[in-house]
């Protein structure tokens, strides 16, 4: 597990290095559009450094009229987002919270990870991620302990789709309490039901997760099921916006299982902007 660009966080497990408490700060506090908080499991240290994360592009789309605290961190699930929001996000007093996640909730629960020895642990403990376990192993090894001596919380057999919606719902409840506008976007991926993966994308995914083509073929329908159930349940939640069909019928869109190529991440940000404007209009 590559820990480059990340540092240990005793509650979240890890955050991106060279940030302010895990947040990139875009713009200044005097921005007339107010403060936007972004969370999710997408932004890598490289994307943040190059200012090519979806939050950075959103900042540019909004003509730098806002201040954005980007806490989106590669590998996070809705569980880390919930913790980060409770511990840090509420204190930042954002006007709007935007979440873009779902892929890692599904992936960890379905066993899509390179570190197969952690599959059962991640299936039962949604508040844990592979990179978090790697940090724990480094730390506990200094005391003669192993990751089997760490408490990861109570076991949870909730299906991935239901767990994601439940945690997003908890975030929304908190936002209502503190007067924060909230939009949660179901993250598209190469496993979205209507997406047409290429052989090149399949090869990249197999390499990333040490899969055979047969294993990849077996896991894809399980992702489709999670997406389908999330879509159906999200219809009754006006703060959840399903982006899983964003690239339906397309191919060659992803560099791996979930990171979009440059021209396509622009499309993602445009879609988020449109949804944000609709939400703002409703709030007036």
Image (spheres, helix red, strand yellow):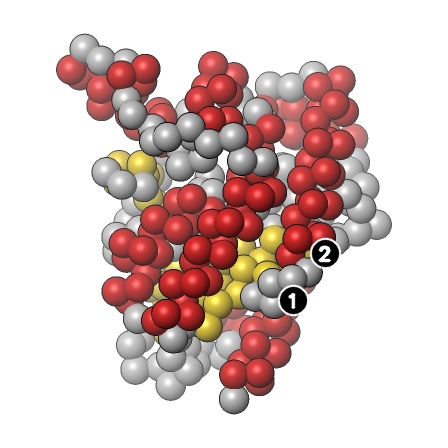
Question: Disc 1 versus disc 2: distance between alpha carbons?
Answer: 9 Å
Residue 273, located in which quarter of the rendered image?
bottom right
Residue 61, located in which quarter of the rendered image?
bottom right
Q: Which mark is residue 63?
A: none
267 over 195 or under it: above or below = below
225 over 81 or under it: above or below = above
251 over 133 or under it: above or below = below
**Disc 1 target residue:** 271
Q: At which x and y percent is residue 275?
A: 61, 71
Residue 137, located in which quarter of the rendered image?
top left
Foreground residue among 71 and 168: 168
**Disc 2 target residue:** 246
Q: Is residue 95 left or right of residue 28?
A: right
Q: Give me the residue at 57% from left, 85% from top.
A: 281
Q: Is residue 243 left or right of residue 27?
A: right
Numbered disc 2: secondary structure: loop
Q: Is residue 229 visible?
A: yes
Q: At which x and y percent is residue 229?
A: 69, 45
Q: Is residue 68 visible?
A: no
Foreground residue among 156 and 273: 156
Q: Earlier in the sequence, mark 1 or mark 2?
A: 2
Q: At which x and y percent is residue 235?
A: 68, 60
Foreground residue among 272 and 128: 128
Other residues around mark 2 within 10 Å, as few (<14) / some (14–19) / many (≥20): some
Q: At which x and y percent is residue 226?
A: 67, 40
Q: Give me the residue at 52% from left, 83% from top.
A: 283
Q: Quadrant of the N terminus?
A: top left
Q: Give me the residue at 74% from left, 23% from top.
A: 218
């Amino acid at each position: 597990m590559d820990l480059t660009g990340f540092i240990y966080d005793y509650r979240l497990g890890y955050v991106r290095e060279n940030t302010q408490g895990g947040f990139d700060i875009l713009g200044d506090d005097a921005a007339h559009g107010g403060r936007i908080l972004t969370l999710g499991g997408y932004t890598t240290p490289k994307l943040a450094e190059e200012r090519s994360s979806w939050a950075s592009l959103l900042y540019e789309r909004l003509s730098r009229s806002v201040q954005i605290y980007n806490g989106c961190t590669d590998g996070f699930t809705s569980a880390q987002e919930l913790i980060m929001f409770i511990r840090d996000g509420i204190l930042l007093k954002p006007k709007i919270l935007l979440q873009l996640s779902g892929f890692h909730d599904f992936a960890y629960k379905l066993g899509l990870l390179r570190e197969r020895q952690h599959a059962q642990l991640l299936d039962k403990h949604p508040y844990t991620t592979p990179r978090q376990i790697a940090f724990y192993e480094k730390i506990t090894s200094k005391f003669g302990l192993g990751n089997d001596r760490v408490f990861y919380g109570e076991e949870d057999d909730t299906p991935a789709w239901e767990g994601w919606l439940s945690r997003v719902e908890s975030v929304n409840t908190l936002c209502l309490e503190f007067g924060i506008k909230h939009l949660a976007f179901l993250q598209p991926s190469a496993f979205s039901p209507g997406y047409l993966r290429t052989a090149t994308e399949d090869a990249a995914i197999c390499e990333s997760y040490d899969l055979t083509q047969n294993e990849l073929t077996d896991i894809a329908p399980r992702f489709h099921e999670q997406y389908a159930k999330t879509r159906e349940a999200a219809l009754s939640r006006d703060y959840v916006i399903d982006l899983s069909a964003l690239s339906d019928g397309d191919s060659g869109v992803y560099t791996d299982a979930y990171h979009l190529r440059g021209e396509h991440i622009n499309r993602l940000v445009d879609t988020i902007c449109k949804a944000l404007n609709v939400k703002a209009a409703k709030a007036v």
